């Protein structure tokens, strides 16, 4: 079964570390961080269309710090409701909003005020504020109704959650029967040491809380998600300081993972 929080793990310290980091990114996306950011990174490392990204507001694309490409996993259809459950500055939710169109609905949830402000401004600048709604909330307790969402997208955030089972329960709760999860996240090839698991700074670097690959499948199945599959892998930490925080034998990397809720 998927990892739980290590013994004596300081969850509040971790949450504050994450909030402080992403508030800083929201205010100064070009500063030095332990992870890549921006549209060039998204295009060259993760396979996004740079041409499409260049049509989006920079306030959203410059602050992008995902680890994969959930938009590329499968169809997002006109008229559907999409939820980005930790939307950051909103690059993925804007791309999703264009796909659902005027008859659809795109909801972004984020815990960081500065990122929510960027996402709202990005939606306004992109002419998508009639489709996009940004809400304050946590991925462990989504401010979204039961069985109201066709697609949940997620990019690089489950690894930051100490209680991953609760995050997956919330994803399943809000999905309609047959609804899809398009998730990009970090996995490792072998279990981290207890020392690394108990270090909130390593968690905040997006590696300490990463699942080992079999745990991802087990976790999805345990909450009623089926047909789980990893469709693509990304060397998203290449040439970053995060890559140096743990041994290279772990091969911490991003994956595209999809699953669907049982009907």
Image (spheres, helix red, strand yellow):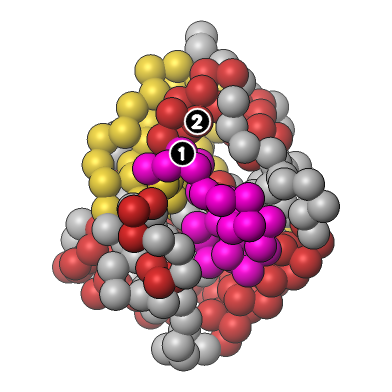
Rounded to the nearest angstrom, the CA distance separating label 1 from label 2 is 5 Å
Query: In percent of the image, x 72 and y 45: which residue is there?
Result: 5
* Residue at 69 percent of width and 71 percent of height: 17
| Residue found 56% across the figure and 22% down from its top | 176
The residue that mark 2 highlights is 215
The single residue placed furthest to the top in the displayed view is: 263
The front one of 87 and 194 is 194
Q: Is residue 216 above or below residue 191?
A: above
Please name the residue shown 50% across and 58% down the image.
Answer: 207
Q: How crowded is mark 1: few (under 14 residues within 10 Å), some or many (20 or more)?
A: some
Is 186 on the left or on the right of 14, as rendered? left
Asked where in the image residue 38 lies, by quadrant, the reply is bottom left
Disc ID at residue 212: 1
Badge 2: how crowded within 10 Å, few (<14), some, or many (20+)?
some
Label 2 residue SS: helix
Which stretch is magenta? Answer: 189-212
Whether residues under marks 1 and 2 lie with C-beta atoms below 8 angstroms apart, the answer is yes
Q: Is residue 101 left or right of residue 116?
A: left
- Say whether residue 76 is visible: no
Residue 254 percent coordinates (x, y)? 35, 51
In x, y percent, where is residue 37?
38, 74
Q: Give yes or no for residue 22 being in the magenta stretch.
A: no
Q: What element carries label 1?
A: strand
Residue 248: percent from left, percent from top? 34, 60
Q: Tell me where residue 210 appears, x and y as whole percent.
A: 51, 48
Q: Which of 167 and 195 is in front in this view?
A: 195
Determine whether, in the image, residue 215 is placed left or right of residue 73: right
């Amino acid at each position: 079964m998927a990892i739980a929080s290590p013994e004596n793990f300081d969850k509040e310290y971790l949450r504050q570390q994450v909030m402080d980091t992403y508030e800083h990114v929201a205010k100064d996306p070009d500063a030095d961080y332990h992870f890549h950011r921006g549209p060039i990174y998204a295009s060259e490392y993760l396979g996004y269309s740079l041409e499409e990204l260049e049509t989006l507001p920079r306030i959203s694309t410059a602050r992008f710090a995902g680890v994969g490409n959930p938009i590329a996993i499968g169809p997002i259809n006109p008229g559907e409701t999409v939820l980005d459950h930790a939307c950051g500055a909103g690059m993925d939710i804007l791309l999703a909003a264009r796909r659902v169109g005027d008859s659809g609905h795109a909801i972004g949830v984020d815990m960081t005020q500065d990122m929510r402000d960027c996402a709202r401004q990005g939606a306004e600048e992109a002419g998508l504020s009639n489709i996009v709604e940004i809400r304050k909330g946590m991925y462990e307790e989504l401010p979204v109704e039961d069985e109201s969402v066709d697609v949940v997208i997620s990019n690089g955030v489950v690894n930051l959650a100490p209680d991953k089972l609760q995050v997956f329960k919330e994803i399943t709760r809000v999905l309609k029967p047959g609804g899809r999860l398009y998730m990009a996240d970090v996995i490792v090839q072998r279990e981290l040491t207890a020392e690394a698991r108990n270090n909130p700074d390593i968690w905040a670097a997006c590696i300490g809380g990463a699942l080992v690959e079999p745990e991802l499948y087990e976790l999805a199945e345990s909450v009623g998600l089926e047909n789980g599959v990893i469709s693509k892998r990304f060397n998203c930490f290449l040439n970053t300081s995060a890559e140096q925080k743990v041994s290279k034998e772990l091969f911490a990397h991003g994956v595209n993972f999809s699953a669907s809720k049982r009907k």
